[in-house]
Image: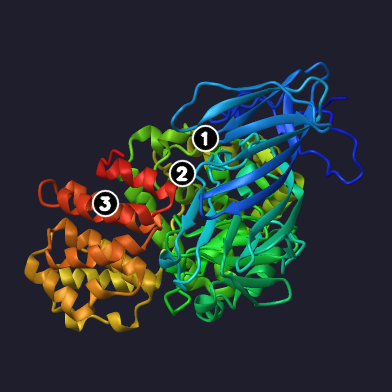
Amino acid sequence: MRIILPALLLLAAPLSAAAPVPSPILTTPDARDALSYARPEVARVTHVDLDLRADFAAKVMRGSATLDIAAKPGASEIILDDKGLVIERITDAGGRALTWAVGKADDYKGAPLTIRIGAARRIVIAYHSKPDASALGWLPPELTAGKKKPFLFSQGQSIENRSWIPTQDSPGIRQSWSARITVPADLVAVMSGTRLTPRGEPAGKSWKRYRFRMEHPVPPYLIALAVGDLAFKPLGARTGVYAEPVTLAPAARELDDTEKMVRAAEGLYGPYRWGRYDMLVLPPSFPYGGMENPTLTFLTPTIFTGDKANTDVVAHELAHSWSGNLVTNATWSDSWLNEGFTTYFENRIDEIVYGKERAAVLADLSWDDLQRDLKEAKPPATRLHGEPEELYGELAYNKGAIFLRTIEHAVGRSRWDAYLRSYFDRHAFQPQTTANFLKDIRARLVKGDAALEKQLQLDAWAYQPGLPGNAYRVRSATLAQVDRAIEQVSEGAPVGTLPFSTWGTQEWQRFLNGLPRKLSTERLAELDGAMRLSASPNAYVRSAWLVLALGNRYQPAVVSAEEYLPRIGRMLLIRPVYRTLVEQGAWGRPIAERIYAGARPHYHPVTVASVDKIVGFTP
């Protein structure tokens, strides 16, 4: 049976009392995912059940995936996404072999895996991943905090999970999932779902098995796994943190406002629907600040600077529990629907928990970052809705957030909040496109008001390059004081007269990024000596300093870069440094190549793919 909704399609699913109701898929042309080979309108995956063993010696995940399928009457095949999987056999639920073939591969998006399913609506794929699977980071003990045991973590966004899970790897094809993960007995496995066996079960000599379940249909990039020497500390009734034992206590201290953040988020836009909200602190090679995996946000240790200055990252990943996880961009052309909404929502959480000025500081810096990206990007890449390969920097985050803040300023906060809460409720567990969002906001907020329609400039924000003239900017009094310090330095004032001893991470970022890009060696040495920038333990400060110093060929900063770059895997904090070195031509490129040659084996595959392009590295 097929049920047609406006622009939505539900395919008939196998009857099962325990199975969740399949999430709808969008069928409009703008919802066609160019980064997936799947044809969900014909046959789609509704549930994934994994039974895998983590083989640390071979650096592979090995076992099987059982897929439940919904299909049109008469459909005879299903197409999955495959990026280097080693398929051993594919059968129906009764063990009957099915015919399958892997098509021509694309370097980025992999290859189509076409399976002749006939009448089968449940199939079993026996397979293993490759050691270089792009979603998986296999770390030896020396690259962990504890230095004693290995570590494994996955990073699925945007289309990397197809390198270790055979499914339809598209954000618009939401799937529930379950898993049994077998790991060495001295390690702990965690996943982004309900943890059914937190302490594991015996699974033969020297092995333990952990079981997980995600009852809600989620976009497949949110299926996430980590295995390592992990301990847990509760932070509240439904919040807690996993980390290596040596990092658990300091991490918990900086994360102790998490329960307040959950309550603040619920007060804004409705109940938290995922049960627990726990966090996992990963080793430094994690490529992002955080990853919003349901029930288990993954965090980089670079956010821990001793002053809670970067807990906005936690607020951001928590906000994704509504914008991104609950309502998801149908394709990566509309990633701003995830990231722009979340960046706006994050700032509202920060305001409630830490006050208006803290939120103003972060919003003001967001404006700075947007101006940088607008200046550096080609015009097509400055649109909110665009081709995934065109999207630039953090533009989807900051332009999207400023768009929503502009709407809030135009209609008033109470009216905007009522709309946004309704939006999350009405589109819960569904994919979304820019066109559908604009249609929704016009129907439920603008309501035919021609003056408001003209004031908001909705289409210009969504589809045109640049920044519309109605953009609303928040200015911070705290950062205004830092701007005065920048002026003093630019005018030649001694560095020692500046009030930098009271600055937090955000003030340092504004200061270092706001200084003139051309400074003398003597001035740089004065800054470095007074502020100890080359030795800063704050990864944000060190990154901003290295960009400035290396951009002026300040030789003492090279030693700092040699120490810093190999131990930090977060792309936001290392790509600008590598890019700066490469831009220095004959002086800087050899330095970048030399450092990267030693650091590359320590980075996650996602980071490697990105920095390879900057440095011009050819494997």
Viewer-nearest residue: 388 or 260: 388
Q: How busy is the neighbourhood of tag 2: few (under 14 within 10 Å), some, or many (20 plus)?
A: some
Give the residue type that dot 2 points to.
Asp
- CB under 8 Å between discs 2 and 1: yes
The residue pinned by badge 1 equals 84
State the residue position of label 3: 597
The residue shown at (18%, 83%) is 496
* Residue found 17% across the figure and 56% down from its top: 551
Tell me if residue 87 comes above or below residue 217 in the rendering. above
- In the image, 419 versus 22, the foreground residue is 22
Give the left or right position of residue 477, taking residue 488 as reference: right
**Point 57% across, 44% down: residue:** 337
Q: CA distance from mark 1 to mark 3?
A: 25 Å
Residue 132: assigned label: 2
Pick whichever of labels 2 and 1 is earlier in the sequence.
1
For the question of whether residue 516 can be seen, the reply is no
Task: Tell me the quarter of the picture where residue 171 sits.
Answer: top right
